[in-house]
Image: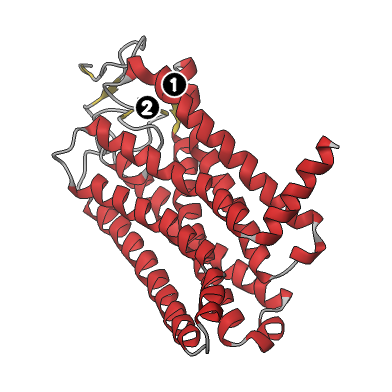
Amino acid sequence: MQKTPLCLRVGHFLPYAMSDSNTTDFTNPSTFIILGIPDLEEAHIWISIPFCAMYGIAVLGNFTILFIVKRESSLHGPMFYFLCMLAISDLVMSTSIVPKMLSIFWFNSREISFSACLTQMYFVHSFSGMESGILVAMAFDRYVAICNPLRHSSILTNSVVAKIGLAVVLRSGILALPYPFLARQWPYCRTNIIPHYYCGHIAVVKLACADIRISSYYGLFDLLSVIGMDGFFIAMSYTQILRAIFRLPTKDARLKTFGTCISHVCAISALYIPDLFSSLIQRFDHNMPLHLRILLTSVYQMVPPVLHPVIYGVRTKQIRGRLLQLITHKKT
């Protein structure tokens, strides 16, 4: 049987090949080969340093948020419950990508099984959508706190917060389900080499020898519907918030009230701007070199998990105060 050599420049790997004689039956390759960042293999060690540092900051920062909220009973409220959900989703999101990326950079461990690849794909897309939904829930919390402050505790009870959290998880989990199912159904008869650092949906289905427009259209639909829907609800919340702020009698009162929203606005910017930019680059900017596109995407995916705990740790007085107490107590 004639084989088509499909080895790209993959460091010290031996050539990988797949049979092209029976494309209809060959649908599930046993393994994929993840290149990391193509054409920059020799710089992988140096590239790994900032990514390892960002991952360390993300893990430390988000675990610190979870620890402080758990320990401090005064922080047991809707805003901080949503913040904990955001911290968990950031941890899962970054952990789904970075350890495998570092194993590629450090140990040349590029193989990943087909099932593990689809699992990584599901987790990445699911928790990316979950982060967006949590920011909508946090916008609703800000709306109630500013527009109906006297009813805040009666509207956002623990039961309501749990139901909102469950709705966010179910929505993102259901919307991400088609990704692995669509990827599984295509025949992969050309190559099993993924020119990326993780099993993203588009990066995987581009290897299929079939018309993948359904996969591409669904990915675009998911991106625009989630950002569109969540962006709409966030915009509606902040429209009402700004109307309530402008009705306040003094400038100091307006600034102080809007100051309670600054952390949330920064968190929205840290998630949506990089996510939208990297997704559009991946789909439409074919003139940009592949390695530069992938490098930019990897940086953008690490921005939210790193910035979210920093933003809330610096901007939220209760968390900042509790953290300073822990640090000074350890020093004494």
Circle 1: residue type = Phe
Q: Which mark is residue 105?
A: 1
| Pointer 2 residue | 36
- Label 1–label 2 contact, CB within 8 A: yes
193 or 261: which is nearer to us?
261
Circle 2: residue type = Gly
Identify the residue shown where x is 40% and y is 76%.
235
Identify the residue shown where x is 58% and y is 50%.
309
Q: Residue furthest right?
A: 332
Identify the residue shown where x is 75% and y is 53%.
322
Identify the residue shown where x is 48% and y is 37%.
97
Tell me the quarter of the image containing the N terminus. Answer: top left
Q: Secondary structure at mark 1?
A: helix
Q: Secondary structure at mark 2?
A: loop
Q: How many marks?
A: 2
190 or 284: which is nearer to us?
284
Real-space Cα separation, disc 1 to disc 2, in angstroms: 7 Å
Q: How does the figure colour the protein chain or chains?
A: secondary structure
